[in-house]
Image: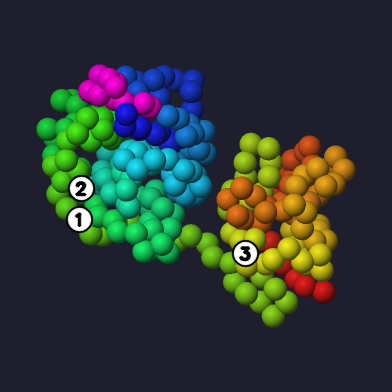
Amino acid sequence: MTIITLTTDFGLKDGYVGVVKGVILGICPPVRVIDISHFIAPQNVLEAALTLGRTARFFPPGTVHVAVVDPGVGTIRRPIAARIGEQYFIGPDNGIFSVVLKQADEQGARYDFIHLDNPAYWLKEVSNVFHGRDIFAPCAAHLAAGVPFEQLGSAMEDPIRLRIPEPRQTAQGWAGEVLHVDSFGNLATNITAEMIGMSKNMKVRIGGAVIQGIVRAYGERQSGELVALEDSAGLLSIAVVNGSAAQRLKATLGTPVEITYS
C-alpha cells in the first residue's frame, strides 16, 4: 500500500487538512495518509524543509510526501514534484525540499523534477489560494494510484533552494545558531554532535548562559537544569530538564550558539 504524508502550516481548526485528505482518498481510496505535521509556523518554509529533513528518510520507498507551506500560492511560483532517491515529493517551488536535496547530494542519491503543469491531474476548478487541495493533493493521489511520475508535467532542472545556515569553525571551537524550537521548548542548533564530540571540557554559550559539557540523556541532570545534548537527529540541542529552554533563554530561530573548549 502506497503512503502519502502531509506536512503543512494549516493547523487543524479550519478543515483544510480534512479536505486535502478527502481529495486524496477520492482519487486513490487504498492509499494510507500519514500526518507529519500541520503546525509548521505560518509561512515558515525553512521550518517545513527542516521537518522533512528530519522525517522523510524514515518512510519506505515509494512514499509520496506532500508539503504545503506556500506563501507564494497563486503567483508565478511553480507547483513541482521531485523524485529523490526512492521517494517522491510534491509541493511549491519555494525551497521547501532544500534539506532533503542537500541530504541527497551528501549521499550521492539521484533526483529529478517535474513542473506540475499537466491539468489532467488537477481538480477541474483550481483556486488561486488553495493549490494544496486543487493541485498538490490530486497529483499526489494520481502518483500513488500508479500514474507515471513523468506524466504529471514537464521536466525541469532548476528548483529553488534555500540557504540553510551553516556553522563555522572558530579558533576556539564552533559558532552556529538555533534552527528549530520544538513544542517542548528544546533548541536544535545547526551544529552536529559529530562536529563537536562529547567532551566534558566543552562549553556551550547561548543567550547569556554557559553550559559545561554534554549529557547523553535528560535524566542525567535534575529537573530545571539547563543541559546540552545530542538530539534524535544528531544535532546539538539545548534543553531545560522538564522545562523550556526557549522560555528560559528567550531564544528563537537564529539565536547564536558558541562552542568553546577549555
User: Does the magenta portion include 32?
Assistant: yes
The N terminus lies in which quarter of the figure?
top left
Residue 194 lies in quadrant:
bottom right
The quadrant where residue 72 appears: top left
The percent position of residue 121, horizontal first and vertical second, equals: 16, 32
Dot label at residue 115: 2
Q: Residue 114: image x %, image y %? A: 21, 49
Q: Is residue 170 above or below residue 131?
A: below
Residue range in magenta is 24-33
Taking the image as shown, residue 103 lies to the left or right of residue 147, namely right
* Residue 92 makes an appearance in the image: no
20 and 73: which is toward the camera:
20
Q: Which residue is at the far right?
A: 222
Callout 1: SS: strand
Report the side of 36 relative to 116 (left or right).
Answer: right
**Which residue lies under the disc numbered 3?**
194
What amino acid is labelled 2 in the image?
His
How packed mark 3 is, by other alpha carbons closer than 10 Å (few <14, some 14-19, many 20 or more), is few
Expressed as whole percent of the image width and height from the top left, the position of residue 174 reads: 66, 70
Could you tell me the amino acid type at mark 1?
Met
Q: Is residue 146 above or below residue 160?
A: above
Which residue appears at 20% of the width and 55% of the height?
156
Q: Quadrant of the C terminus?
A: bottom right
Is tag 2's residue or tag 3's residue first in the polypeptide sequence?
Answer: 2
Q: According to the image, label 1 marks what residue?
A: 156
